[in-house]
Image (spheres, coloured by chain):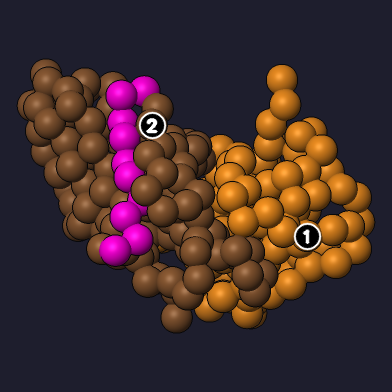
Chain colours: A orange, B brown
Amino acid sequence: DGGITQSPKYLFRKEGQNVTLSCEQNLNHDAMYWYRQDPGQGLRLIYYSQIVNDFQKGDIAEGYSVSREKKESFPLTVTSAQKNPTAFYLCASSIDGTSGSGELFFGEGSRLTVL
Amino acid sequence: GNSVTQMEGPVTLSEEAFLTINCTYTATGYPSLFWYVQYPGEGLQLLLKATKADDKGSNKGFEATYRKETTSFHLEKGSVQVSDSAVYFCALRRNTGGFKTIFGAGTRLFVKA
């Protein structure tokens, strides 16, 4: 089955540690995205990538980093510079980054808790 | 700037009741509009979409009509079920300048048997 796989589903981190969230898709989509979800708030865009080896900052990129070395993979690193990293992180993809009607396909999310 | 505003929840209904979740947007140009649904502990999935004015999106008994004159995209269902309990997000996707999707805050729906 085609889809987006995020791992791990739950992650605990001590303050000062970096952590990397995995996102893999087999939909052959060009564009991939990382969103952060906090209780009572909508999704906020962290980073997005429209093509391999290229990515752009979203609205809340500070304290995060990404890479896009392969079309299928878009890992997110939450660094120690992120002041409030406890959240639910969602990875998504779309067929391309230029289609205005393009729907997003989401993974099941990763819940990060900083102890 | 571009934004989406949807009614605050939670919304609590009895089974078979009529559902309306209001959504209004601010955007330049002609964005595409979406409703996504999130079940507990899961990611979001597309419920329905509309790409131009007066289009009606529909799926699983849910409907929403793209109203440019009132900049609205209200979600409706004639008879809700317990299985419809979830969080519903209204969203827009700009057709220019980066094609980012902008989400509303979400509305939680509880349906009682």
**In this picture, residue B21 sits left or right of residue A50:** left
* Residue A20 within the magenta-colored segment of the rendering: no
Tell me the quarter of the picture where residue A49 sits. Answer: bottom right
Q: A111 and B113: which one is in front?
A: B113
**Can I make out residue A86 in this image?**
no
Check disc 1: other Cα within 10 Å, few if <14, some if 14-19, many if 20+: many
Residue B2 higher or lower than B112, as above or below: below
Residue placed at 62% from the left, 48% from the top?
Answer: A102
A40 with respect to A18 (left or right): left
Which range is magenta? B60-69
The vertical placement of A2 against B107, above or below, is above
State the residue in front, B16 or B39.
Answer: B16
Disc 2 packing (10 Å; few <14; some 14–19; many ≥20)? some
Q: Chain of mark 2?
A: B
Residue that badge 2 annotates? B58
Q: Position of residue A86 (x, y in %)?
A: 49, 62
The x and y percentages for residue B62 are: 31, 31
The residue positioned 26% from the left and 63% from the top of the image is B70
At mark 2, the secondary structure is strand
| Three-letter amino acid code of the residue under disc 1 | Gln
Which numbered disc, 2 or 1, marks the residue closer to the eye? 2
Q: Secondary structure at mark 1?
A: strand
Q: In the image, what residue type sits under mark 2?
A: Ser
Q: Which residue is mark 1?
A: A50
Question: Measured from the top left, where is residue A17 in percent x and y?
Answer: 67, 67
